[in-house]
Image (cartoon, helix red, strand yellow):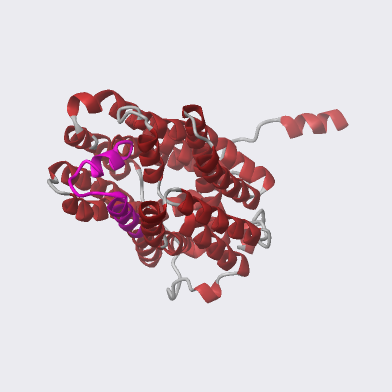
Amino acid sequence: MRNVFRLKQTLPREETPKSKESRRIVRIFSWSSFLNDMGSDMIFAIWPLFVTSFAGVNMEILGLIDGIGEAIVSISQAVSGYVSDRLRKRKIFIWTGYALAVLSRIGYALSTTWHWLIPFRILDRSGKMRGSPRDAIIADVSTNENRGRNFGILRMMDNLGAVFGIIFAIIFIQYLGYKTVFLIATIPSVLATLLIIIFVKERPLAKTKLFKGIRLSNLNRNFRLFMLLSTIFALGSFSYSFLLIYAKNFGFAVTFVPVLYLIFTVVASILSIPFGKLADKIGRKKVVGISFLAWAFTCLALIFLRSNFGLIIIFILYGIHLSAKDVSQRTFVSELAPAQFRASGLGGFQMVVGLVALPSSLMAGFLWEKAGILVPLYFSIALTAIAFFLLLFIKDTKINEGAL
């Protein structure tokens, strides 16, 4: 009897219609993310080089443009998350976000001065309105046992699409030039838009009698503390553009700089699912801590390593940081927020954390220009240490759905 019981325990569970639908949803969003990120990273791999090719652009202006972009990301995700919960709709925000990305890339290609990049950067980053509603759907169709893995799959496909986009940019930038590459980058995002419109059906969401929105005072202590420490960390974590310009100044050829971008993107792609599974196994908090440590080591490597091999190590560490942070943060926040307000919680978190990207990038650019590259690095390490210390006081979220 004991052997029979063990045999039953090892038999695979029959897949339910709900689990099949969950896998289908994750698969569609993963492929749409793959396509859009393929287009995005045709641009992002050469973005800092493109921006600094305009007359009169220095590191402060690059920091300003990147900072504005990240701030817009935060606002767009918060607004779309709130409105999505209020209207009880998700799909329209997702395909509209991809469509805005298409329009912005056409704008980049038509820009003749760096000033025109700002409105199109705002349009581009406004397309991130898709993030909170999409992540809310992923969280809703997942369980505590596979939520980290599902977000890991999504991030893996994000980064895998980025790998293809970067390779395209590396091969063709010298033949086509910036603006032609940007126009070609619209094609994958058009396909991503159509994929969502045609194959995603709007799921009816449970309606509440009165929508009051999500308030900070109604969130538990864990959520508030996690938002605080994540904001502190974000204040010191500058844009990847600074790493690429550092590599260029170090002596890497302009045509090789996108290869460094490719390195950290490949690392992030490979590790996204493992970190998602690790978050499901050991908890979200520990993986967030790993991401903080990886960033601190990235900064330390920038300070002490002075070789081509050392620079490659820096971009590998940055890829580890990105994959651990993206997966664990999304999973953590989606579980800390009340289930009926997941999109609002995810969007609100991204807004608060992301709004500091503007002063963060501006500060990093200013310190770089006025005091040298080492000063923003030491500043970032100090804030990372504070955030890591506060993380010790957070309770993990491997809890039952009903406790959220």
Evaluate whether residue 92 shows in this view: no
Q: Which residues are magenta?
A: 44-71
Which of the two residues, 265 or 18, is positioned nearer the viewer here? 265
Q: Quadrant of residue 64?
A: bottom left
Q: Is residue 70 left or right of residue 145?
A: left
Residue 363 magenta-drawn? no
Percent of width and height locating residue 173: 24, 28
The residue lying at 44 percent from left, 75 percent from top is 212
Which of the two residues, 147 or 68, is positioned nearer the viewer here? 68
Evaluate whether residue 35 shows in this view: yes
> Which quarter of the figure is the C terminus placed in?
bottom right
Q: Is residue 320 left or right of residue 131?
A: right
Q: Residue furthest front?
A: 371
Percent of width and height locating residue 259: 38, 28
Percent of width and height locating residue 277: 61, 40
As drawn, 288 above or below 301:
below
Which of the two residues, 15 or 228, is positioned nearer the viewer here? 228
The residue lying at 61 percent from left, 65 percent from top is 222
Which of the two residues, 276 or 67, is positioned nearer the viewer here? 67
> Which quarter of the figure is the N terminus placed in?
top right
